[in-house]
Image (tube, rainbow, N blue to C red):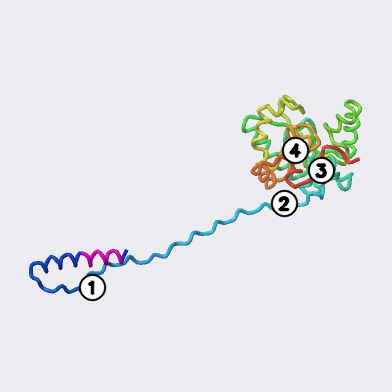
Amino acid sequence: MLRSSLAALLLGALITSVAGCAVTREPLVLDPSPSASSMPSASPTRTPTPTPAPTPSPTFDRAARSIDDPASAWVVVNKLRPLQPADFVPPNLRVARIAATQQLEMRDGTATAAEAMFADAAAAGVPLRITSAYRSFESQARINRQLVQQLGQERADIASARPGHSEHQTGLAIDVGALSGTCELDACFGTTPQGLWLVENAYRYGFILRYPDGLTAITGYAYEPWHWRYVGVELATEMRETGVATLEEFFGLPPAPAYAG
């Protein structure tokens, strides 16, 4: 830019001087060093402002809690992952202060989260109640025997866990229904206002729908819109945001459609 401006000034001066020479016939003299006042001023050099590097998003730590320890809120129990020990009894069992079909115990953390969730559901006009929570090894064995007698082993294994493989034995699972009893322990519960509210809001309290529709080949169980598993708000929110529906998929575990033996 400076060179082109200087050339223009020199050319203009040359034309003016030539025109003057035609009249006065005086010799043309070019000053090779123009004065500072005739030099165009250069714009000050601006140092570009560096673009700050983006702050990386924190990575969810999938190893923060055990998925093997039955006392952990992240424990994964399925047909290939029995509880160790098989007759595990969870600590801190208590009865939640919520509507229920009977006195039902669950882990203290599960109960506290359920109490908050049930209170907010009632305030939203979709009152809930629980129909099942903690089951001992013996209770699960009795239920499983009854189902096998009624349905046969194959169908019973899709409807209920064998003893030592049940989430209910961890004290972290609850079966939830409408306070009115509509569609209780039935797939149609997923279409009720209560079922729809849970799908949209249960993660806020740390619960996930453990056996989603169409994923029997992964979880090993039929769709159970009433079965909600407490995993804590952190994990439930991460699964919600990443769109991962099952614990097996989230933790990179093999599908568990059937028992090993």
Q: Residues within 10 Å of mark 1 (few under 14, many from 20)?
A: few
Q: Nearer the viewer, residue 34 or 159?
A: 34
Q: Which residue is mark 4?
A: 210
Q: Which mark is residue 34?
A: 1
Mark-to-mark CA distance, 4 and 1: 85 Å
Which of the two discs, 2 and 4, labels the residue nearer the N terminus?
A: 2
The answer to which of marks 2 and 3 sits earlier in the sequence is 2
- Disc 3 to disc 4, C-alpha distance: 11 Å
- Are the residues at dot 3 and dot 4 in contact (C-beta closer than 8 Å)? no
Disc 4 versus disc 1: nearer the observer: 1
Under mark 2, the amino acid is Arg
Which residue does the numbered mark 3 point to in the structure image?
77
**What secondary structure is found at the residue carrying circle 4?**
loop
**In front: label 3 or label 1:** 1
Q: CA distance from mark 3 to mark 1?
A: 89 Å
In x, y percent, where is residue 258? 85, 37
Magenta range is 3-11
What is the secondary structure assignment of the residue under circle 1? loop
Q: Amino acid at mark 1?
A: Pro
Task: Please provide percent x and percent y for residue 126.
Answer: 65, 30
Pointer 3 local density, CA inside 10 Å: few below 14, some 14–19, many at least 20 = many
Left or right of 215, for residue 162: right
How far from the left and from the top, in percent, is residue 223? 76, 31
* Residue sitting at x 23%, y 73%: 34
